[in-house]
Image (tube, rainbow, N blue to C red):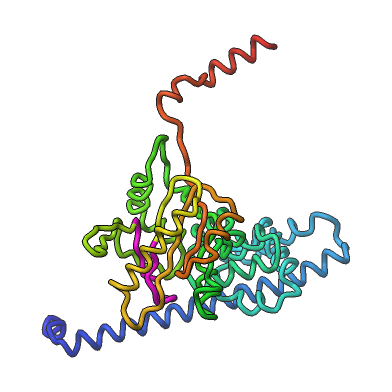
Amino acid sequence: MRENLLDSAGYANWLKEIKERIRIARQKVALAANSELISFYWDLGKMMEKLSASALWGKNWIEALSKDLQDEFPDMEGFSKTNLYNIKRLYQFYKDDVFSHQAGGKIPWRHHVEIFTKAKSMEEAHFYIKETIESGWGREVLALQIKSQLYQRQGKSISNFKKTLPEPLSDLAQQTLKDPYVFDFLTMTKPFHEKDIEQQLINHITKFLLELGKGFAFIGKQFHLMVGETDYYIDLLFYHTKLKCYVAIELKNTKFIPEYAGKLNFYLSAVDSLIKQDDDKPTIGILLCRDKNNFETEFALRDIHKPMGVSEFKLTEILPEELKSSLPSIEEIESELKKLE
C-alpha cells in the first residue's frame, strides 16, 4: 500500500507540503522557546542587578544562587555561576535599549553572549544582532565576523557611488563594500602573484563569499570579454542578488595607482554593453589592492563615470622554507638566554 502511495505524484507532492509545514512549525516552536528563554534571562538579570545594588548578602551570593538553582532544577541548563554572571551582564548592557530587548528573542543565547561581551558600543551590538538575524549566522560565523571587526570595516571603502548611482542604491552599494577585506583563510608564501591569490579565493569560495557579504553569486574567474577584436579577462565576476547588478572585481597585489581605475572603468563599460540586461542595474566595480593612499584614490575616482570602490585586502603571509631554516630554533634561543643568565 505504502509503495503505491509513494509512486503517486499527487501523494508525493502532498507529502512534500506536509514535511515543509512541519519544518516551519518546528522553526516557530524553536523561535518561541528561544524568545521565552531570552525574556526570562532578561527578567532574571534585572532581579540580580537590583540585588547587587542592595548588597545584602555579600560578594558570593551568585555562587550560592547557582548551587541552589541547580539543586532545585537539576535537569535544566543555564544556572552555572558563569552563565548567571552573563545573564546579569545581558541586562546591564541592554537595560536602556528597546531594540535589543525586542529583537533579542530572534537570536540564540550564546550569540547574545558573543555580542554583549565583545561589542564596544550599543550601535555595534545592534549591527551584529541585525546581521545575525538577516544572514542566519551560526555562532562560529558570528564570532569570526566580530574578530575580523566587520562593524568597523563595513561601508568604509572609498567609492564614487554618490555621484554615479541614484539613491537609495548608492547607499546600499556603499554598505555592501568593506575596507579592508580580510582574507585570513589564505596562507601565501612570497613571492606570490595575483593569479595565485585569485585561485586560492576560488578554492575557498565559501569563505570568500562570506567575507564579501550576503547577496554575492559567483559567475566566473578570468571572465572572457571580446571588445572589437581583442580579448579581455575580468579577474572575478559576480552578480549581486540584492543590488540586482553585476559586480566586477579586480585584484592588484600592489599599491593602488590611478591607471587601475581606468582599466576597471573599461571593463564595466564592456559588461554593461555585452552582458547586462535591460532590467539589471549598472555594473559595479571593486578594485582590491594591497595598499592605497586615500587622497590619491578619491582624486582618481573623481571623474570616473562608472560606479566603483577601492579597498585594501589583507591575507596571511607565511615564511618560505629557506627563510624558516635560517631562523634560530626555540632550543637555540633558550640556550642563548641561559648563557646570558
Q: Quadrant of the C terminus?
A: top right
Locate residue 339, reporting x and y percent.
Answer: 64, 9
Residues 41 and 286: in front is 286
Q: Residue at x 50, y 57 (%)?
A: 140
- Is 272 within the magenta? no
* Quadrant where the N terminus is found in the figure: bottom left
Q: Residue furthest top?
A: 339
Which image quarter: residue 210? bottom left
In the rendered image, residue 65, in percent from the top left (x then y), is placed at 73, 61
Residues shaded magenta = 235-248
Is residue 245 covered in magenta? yes
Q: How many marks?
A: 0
Magenta stretch, overall SS:
strand
In-image side of 267 versus 181 (left or right): left
Query: Residue most toward the bottom?
Result: 10
Q: Is residue 166 above or below residue 303?
A: below
Q: Nearer the viewer, residue 321 or 240?
A: 240
Q: Is residue 44 above or below residue 55?
A: below
Could you say which quadrant of the image residue 80 lies in?
bottom right
Q: Is residue 274 left or right of residue 146?
A: left
**Looking at this view, is 47 or 309 the one in front?**
309
Residue 123 point in image, percent of width and height: 67, 68
